[in-house]
Structure formats: C-alpha cells, structure tokens
Amino acid sequence: MSTAGFNSQNGTGQAYANGPSQNPVGLQPLPGVSYGMTHQPTYNPMQAKAPATTGTGLYPSGPYQPVHPVSPYQPGPTLSSYPAPSGQSLLTRPLIGGPPSHTPPQSSSPGPRLPPAQATPPPPAVSSSSYYPNPQQPQPMAPAWQYSTAPPPMGQPTSMSVPPRGLVPNNVNPAASSTPPPAPYSSAPSAHVSHSVTQTPGPGMPSTSLHGYTQPGPAPPPMTHTAPHAYQSSRAPYGSPPTGPPPTMKPTPPHTGSLMINATPPPPKADGTVAGNGQQAPNSYNHVDNKMAGLPQHGPPGRHLGHYPSLPPGYQNTSATHNAGPPMHPAMQAATQPYTQAPQTYQQPPGGPGPAQLSPSLAALSLQSSTPEALRVVNLLQERNLLPPSPMPAPTPCLPQDLQKINCNPEVFRSTLTSIPQTQSLLNKAKMPLGLLLHPFKDLSQLPVVTSSTIVRCRSCRTYINPFVSFLDQRRWKCNLCYRVNDVPEEFMYNPVSRSYGEPHKRPEVQNATIEFIAPSEYMLRPPQPAVYLFILDVSHNAVETGYLHVFCQSLLDNINALPGDSRTKVGFITFDSTIHFYNLQEGLSQPQMLIVSDIEDIFLPTPDSLLVNLNECKEIVQDLLKSLPNLFEKTMETQSALGSALQAAFKLLSPTGGRMSIFQTQLPNLGVGALQSREDPNQRASAKDIQHLSPATDFYKKLALDCSGQQVAVDLFLLSSQYCDLASLGCISRYSAGSVYYYPSYHHQHNPAQVECFQKDLKRYLTRKIGFEAVMRIRCTKGLSIHTFHGNFFVRSTDLLSLPNVNPDAGFAVQMSIEENLVDMQVVSFQAALLYTSSKGERRIRVHTLCLPVVNSLSDIFAGADVQAITGLLACMAVDRSTTASLSDARDAMTNAAIDSLTSFRQSVLTIQQPGLLAPACLRLFPLFILALLKQKAFRTGTSTRLDDRLFAMCQLKYQPLVYALLMIHPALYRVDDLSDEGALNINDRTIPQPRVLQLSVEKLSREAAFLMDAGTVMYLWIGRNCHPNFLTQVLGVPNYAAVPDNLYLLPELDTAESQRTRAFIGWLRDQRPFFPSLHVIRDESQLKPTFMQNMIEDRTESALSYYEFLLHLQQQISK
Ligand SMILES: [Zn+2]
C-alpha cells in the first residue's frame, strides 16, 4: 500500500507552493529533528505502543512525498474534431482553431447480526501485542529557563502581590456584577458596535485620518509601519471625542488613511496587486499578520500570571452578557441542556466574588477533600445504563464563575481537557490526548461586530485583546498569552456601549469571548476579492443518466439571488466529458455561447474575459444557460471523463481573482491528466484484514489543490455516483484547498428519491450559506503550550497558520497540542483563534474566539476535567490519519489502547482504594462505549461489507464535521417515537417539541410493538416494529397496517393528527439543529436498509465485532495485566 501521499496530512508536509518555488514555512522537519521551540514530542495515544516501523504515529512529520501516480498524466486521445453533443441547438458553437497563445498547465453488505452477548467472548478483536511497552516518550518538559531570555520581570513591582484578578471590589460599577448583560449594543445607535446577524456588516465608519505611529526597531519583512495603536482624533460615531490627552504618537504616513468600509475596493497596494504564478495571492498569508506585528520594545514580558492587578476591577465583575458570547440557536440550546442524571460537569461551588478569588478558588480545586461527580467511580461492568437521557452538554471548565460566564461557547471552541495539566509529563501520565475542537465560522444568531480603526492587539505576540487579559491600570493591559504589558490606545478609553470614557475594561472586546472586527486597511494587501463562483459540471452519459443536472440547474435558478455577494459577484460555468466546454456569457449576447476545447492535454481558455461574468449584469443570460443546460446533453453518448483537464481550466479561470469552484462529478475520471483506475476489489469489502487504497493513487489532485490554495481558490466536490470514484484521490482536491466534500452514493433521480431530496436541500444550503474568501486562521495559545497537528480541510501555511481560500460555517477543525514549558506559575491559560477573511460583500473581517482554561497539577484534577466527547472527536481525527499513514488495524489498535491507557492511568494514579471491576471516573464512563462505536463506525470497521468510497467519505466527515455532528455519526441517538407525549416537551416558537429519552443502542431496547427513530447525523432511520401499534401506523404513517408501509418511504405524510404533528415536530427539530439535511428512511423488517440500521446497534455483538460487554471484558483484561 502506498501511504506516502498522506504522510503529511493536510499539507503539513512540504508545500507545493505555486510553481517551482516552495514555501519554506510549509516544510516539516524529519522525525526527531528539532526545529525550534514549537515542536516537542507529546503523549500520543495512537503512537505510543505502535511498532516503530509502522509509521510516524498520529501526527505525521515526514516531508511530503509525491506518490507516483498509477496513471501519471497519461496522454489521452486528443480529438482533432469538435464533436457536437446532440441537441445543442440553443447554443452557438464556434470552432476553436488550434490553441491560441496559451500557457501550459500551472502544475504539473452488511453482515448478519447475532444475538447479543454470549457467555464466552470471542477472541479479542484487537491486538494485545505490546503497546506502550516503553514510556519512552521523551520528556518534553522544557525547563522553564530554556527560552527565557530574561528573568520574568513582572509588569508590576512586588507590591502588586494582591490576589489576582482585581481583588479590590468593583467600585467602578458596583452594581455591575449583579446586572444581567450589559445593555444591548444596539442601544448605542451611532456606535460602531452592533449585535447583528452575522451576515450583516457593521455600521460603516466614515473614513477618517488615521494617526498611528511608527514602531522603531527591526521589522518582519513586509512591514512598513505598524499601526495597531492608532489614535483617532475625531470619531463621530463615538459621540463626543475623547477628552484625555492623546498619547505620544507620531503621525502615520498618509497613505494608510483610507479605511476599508464599503465595497469599493481601495487602490491596490504596491506589494499586492498581482496574484502571479508562483506567488502567493495576497491577503491571507503570514505577511498580512507580520505586517501588522509590532515588535517588542521593552524587555520580554514575564511568564507569571500570578499577579493580577488590582486596577481596575470593573471588567471582571461586570456580569457577562450572554453565555460565552453569542447565544445558541434555540434548538442547540435545548440540545445542550444539562441532563439530570450523573452530570458530566464538574463545577466548583462558587467560593466568593469570582475572579477576585481566583487563587483561593482554584486552590479549592484540590480534590482530596471531596470527590466531584466527574470523579465518581463507576464500575462499567456493573452499571448498564450509563447514557444520559438527553444529549450531553460539554463539561464546564472549573473556573471562577465570572470568568466562566464570559468564556467561549463550547460549540465554537472546546478542549479535550477542560483542565490543562501543568506539565507535559503530567499529561503523559494521564494518557489522554490534549487538543482543541473548533467550529470557528459557525452561524451565530448574535455576534458583536466592532468597527474600529484601532484593533487592539498585543505588540509582542499579536493576540487580540480579550476578556482574559488583565488591566494594570487604565492605561496598560497585560497580554494573557505572552504576558507583555501593552498600552491602552486612547481610542480604546472610550466605550461605545456605555458611552463613557475611562473604562477600557468595559469595551465589548473585553466583554465578549467571541467578537468580530471589521478590519482597517492594514489587514489587506490587495483589494478584497469579489465573490466568484465557478461551477464545473460533469455532462457525460453517466452524469446525464443520474438526472442530477436538472436538480442542480433548478436549484441554482431558485437561489441565484441568494448567492452571497454584492455588485461585483461573478459566475462562470464549465461542463466536461471527454472535452471541455466553456460558456461565453458576456452581456449583449442573445444567448449563451458554448466553446469547446478538445485539446485536453494542453488546456487553454478560449475567451478568457467573457467566461466569468458579472452576475448582476448578465443574470438573464446565466438563467438562459441554466434553463437549457439539462437538455443540452440529453442524448449524449460520451462516456469519458476528463475531470483533471476541466480542473486545470477552472484553475486558470479563477487564478486572477480567487473564488470558489464547485465540481459535480459522477464517475471515475478516466481521461487525460488526473485519470484514475478502479482500485476497489468488491470481494475485499468485508475483509477483516487491513483495508487497502485509503491513500490517493496520484498526487495530481493534491498538487492542484495546493496551487488553488495559493491563488485563493477553494474546491468543493459533489460526488454523485453509484460506482467507485476513488474518493481517496479525488478528495484531496477539497482537502488541501479548504473545500468541502459531498457524497451521494447511488444517486439517481428516479431510483433514489431520498438522495434527490437530500441533494436538493444540501444545494440550497450550499448556495446560500455564508462564505468567507481569502481567509487565514491562526490559533495562538499561552506561552508554554504549542500546537502541532491540525485536522480538517486546509493547507498549513506555517506552524500556527491555516490557509483557507474559502471558509464556510459548516466546517470544523481540530488541533493537537503539547506542553512545551511547565505552566507552574499559571492558574489559567488561554487559546485564541483568529479568522481573517473577506466577506462576500468585500469587507475584510476578523472573527476572534478566546477560550480560557484552568491549569492544574494533579492527575485527579485532569481526569475531573476530561471531556469525553471532545476526546472521542479528536481521537477519531487522529485515527483517520493513522489509517492512512500506517494502517487501519493500527488505527483500530490505537483507539482501543487509548481507552485502556486512560483507564489504567486512572486506576493506578487516581484511585486510592483498589476495587475489583472495570473502573472509570464518571466523566469517562462513556469512553469505552464511544471507542467501540468508533471501531464499528463505517470509517474504521472491518469484517462488514463497506464500499471503499463510503469508508473514505466517513473518514472525511470525521475530520471535517464540527464535533456535535461527528458525534452523532459515531454514536447515533436512538429514541422511541410511537408514544411521544408532550410531557417534558420543549416549546419553541409555539411549536411543541417532544423530548423522548435517548436509548442504548441495543436490540434489547427495540420492541416489535413500537417504532424507533435513530438519528445518525447525516441520516435518520425510522424503524417500524412488525407489531407496531396500529394507531402509529394510521396516525403517523397514514397506512392501515404494517404490510402497507411502502418500501421507499422517506417522507412522513403531513397528517392532521396529534401523533403526526409530534413526530414531525421532533424530526424537524432534530434537523433544524444541523446545517445539512439528514435524509429519513422508514425501515421495516424486509427493508434493504435494515442491516444498516442494525449495524448501528453498537452495544450488540456481530459476527465480526465484540458486544459492548465483551469489549469491556477485553479492556479489563488488558488493564489488569
Ligand atoms: Zn502577547
């Protein structure tokens, strides 16, 4: 098996920067080679016990090695004629002569189920070979002095030994701590802060002259000046101008004066005008950030956090507004309501006035005195009903209430360990992975948006000011990531919310853990790009057969006015089979003009200027095309697919601007560059051995994706196919360009109506959802912590910077972290994700999320803060990497070991009294179940017939989906729905939503007399028992009896009965909580999908997999070894 192609996951390997020049920042060192201070070995549950030869472990470190393609760039037949697809009467078809001057391409069946649990477990399905034989994990605890260039000078003299976080009572605003959220920002009508629907731009600021001052000292390369601390002498929206004397500043050079406010692009800057070949397109790379970077002028800041200043105490106690930023969608809010039984949350009872008591309250964490619920010992072999009755909320970090109130929403930013170990060795002992899970661009119902010419950031590490910084006094604040003391800019002294002066700690930036800035011109190196959408459509015989073209064209027609964008929005279309068809849509043409290029080996753009057109100006002709396109290829007999060439053409078309490519593909590309061959052996689908061909067959798609990334182009792939399409290879095009993959196996307009509905709904969401262009995301963390592996779809630009040509609100990310320096002096650490993007309206925006977590120094505290869902989600990502860099069996072993190791550690290091049984802390009681669920998940299962593309798609989803949706894919939720009642129901917008309890995934829980709904995230199953009560059949399904339930039922009839309304309300509510559309399948005993449904009964034994109980016995055996 060739694994090289995935050795460097997501481009942590050597970059294929555009053209021959490679981006040095993308280089990844060889294993064991030290490369500075950011990378240290860390505990790696998947790697630890694996034989050294099997791979590099969870996070890859080898340089990217191109795989020799199976069919590398094989020349396809070059057609010399221009065969006309039949039925193209509508379009004119000028012959294209020999290629004009052009440039060469830029870059080179489910198994039967047995009855559950028998007395004798089969041999363990997991290898028990020596894992973790050597705790040889290098001790990465760097001595604290290692990086210190100076003794940690405190920002304050020792007299500052006041307890941290403003012990002094809040005399600035004594009532604040008990006041609910600060007045809504809208109460300051003229202010530049607004709570707005995320799509809405903040109120514009008139352009004013910007008086910054130049920072002396050496600068990062592109830096011309820094202007983070700008003083604005007149700012009308603030009301009265600040009265204090302006700080000492020098005026900025005049050219920085223009603020980016409206959609009109400012004149391009000299250094960022052309997105040339071999060059990075500007606006989203390091230098944007570096350019902004000020340099430390004073001595390096101390690492100590111990001293929180006493001045001004106000901000901490101003009771925070919404819980961690934006309130949740009502549905999600409900979904995360705490459950009553065995709460996951470990909450220290508030021991005083909050932050003022940070130190004592954290000290009270000591668990000797009382055992929190999270550490309650559970004997898994005895306690059967461990599932909470409703979806689990995220555990709450053990922080003083006032800090926690303003902390980031866990749906946006979440850590596997809500208490961060003080040292790497402590983390290694706990045997749990440390990482973050992010959903950074999530649709938020409310988002504070700030328009300001001065975005206050740390001059040393560039952290954005946030709720967890401390103010030494009114004029100075201390960074919570690097501890540098910074000045408060004059402008920041004025609070637009309260319209008061001198309360910088009450600014929205320090009151909200999630906030968005409209960026001033310093944040762009070229005018923000317009929204550009290019659609690339497979029109081969196979594609036309599926009927998808009708759905696509209709959907785009329906939503064409809802495409995010402004007056500059551009669209274009390319269709392809064995040739590439372009469409001249120029204004003034009476109808679209089709241009065919048959020289697919050497693709060129026939009329480069008229293929991407302004949507507003050319809407009619675009609509004409969409109406005629489905019929245009109706009778085509062309079966070949030159996808690679079509992509190259699309890349050429989009390179100058950047934008979004949407590919619709229905078969294996088999012609020209990027051609693929079938690698799937259907006889191996049920293999219990290792699965082959999880890695790409060619590096063509990855290379092209990296080229795209360099030009700010993201590629989204819609795969609609009943055949093998080699998603392992094709998926790279989206993975490295920050695109999305959609997959509709067996799509057919007649045979698979459920898929059609799903495709329609997905398209609507896809076409209309928010989009950010030319984005980068940087994740910073408190000094001492470091990030080393990213999961998701993107290209890693540098150690902490992800390149995201597009960002969409449905994308999730995960990162693994290690502890580089002991965090002994710290009580809390912070993480900040900053997403810089261009909105579809052409605004440069920055969305910032900051998460604060306590630091602990005992294993029991670490365990008490474990977030089993986040751990599972991160392990799933790690296991996907492991499957491709090593093997599937390695990944499976590693997941099992993760459970064994953490429970062993708990038993050995935390439990004081040894008891028999398989013991877990309550917070990890579901860990073995989730691991077993992962082993049985489509991505990782063995011994059950699984199509290769299905498996690959599941792997994509696990890495790309936000945690909450990935968890449903891993462990579906099962509900009994034939007896729904209003008892305990939610009431949302006058709708009553029944809340049945979540059941264990075991046939024990099923009953022939009932009906059950299984919510598996992207798909739902409604299972009808053979003797289901007739009332349910008639009142909900509208059929007289069981035999009359149709085979292909995927829509519940809208009956005017209470039962029907309740059932539909519940299913609709579940659907409303996710951005994609889960299809619904009604299942009877005879249904083809019944085995699929039954396979999700994770707790039961199958021919090829252990039951939950057997799995527990296996774990126990390993732990007691
Ligand atoms: Zn800093």
Image (cartoon, rainbow, N blue to C red):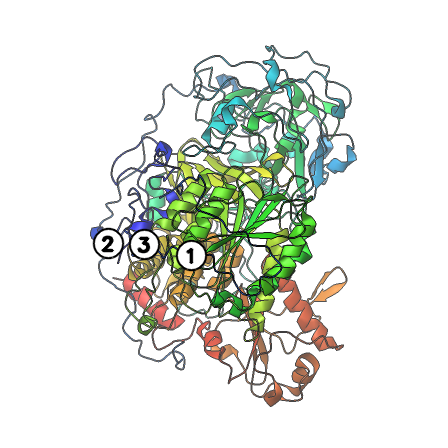
Does label 1 point to a residue whose CB lies under 8 Å from ligand 1? no
Q: Quadrant of the C terminus?
A: bottom left
Which residue type does callout 2 highlight? Thr
Q: What residue does disc 3 label?
A: 74
Which residue type does callout 1 highlight? Ala
Q: Is residue 624 above or below residue 30?
A: below
Q: Is residue 223 visible?
A: yes
Secondary structure, mark 1, is: loop
Of mark 3 and mark 2, the one earlier in the sequence is: 2
Q: What residue does disc 2 label?
A: 54
Total numbered labels: 3
Q: Is residue 314 visible?
A: no
Q: Which mark is residue 789?
A: none
Q: Nearer the viewer, mark 3 or mark 2?
A: 3
Of mark 2 and mark 1, the one earlier in the sequence is: 2
Secondary structure, mark 2, is: helix
Q: Quadrant of residue 682?
A: bottom left
Residue lying at 59% horizontally and 58% vertically, measured from the top left: 763
How many angstroms separate mark 3 from mark 2 (CA)? 32 Å
Which residue type does callout 3 highlight? Gln
Q: Quadrant of residue 93?
A: bottom right
x and y percent of residue 400 in the render?
57, 40
Question: Along the horizontal axis of the image, is 540 left or right of 889?
Answer: right
Q: Is residue 360 above or below residue 323?
A: above
Q: Is residue 436 above or below residue 508?
A: below
Q: Quadrant of the N terminus?
A: bottom left
Q: What residue does disc 1 label?
A: 642
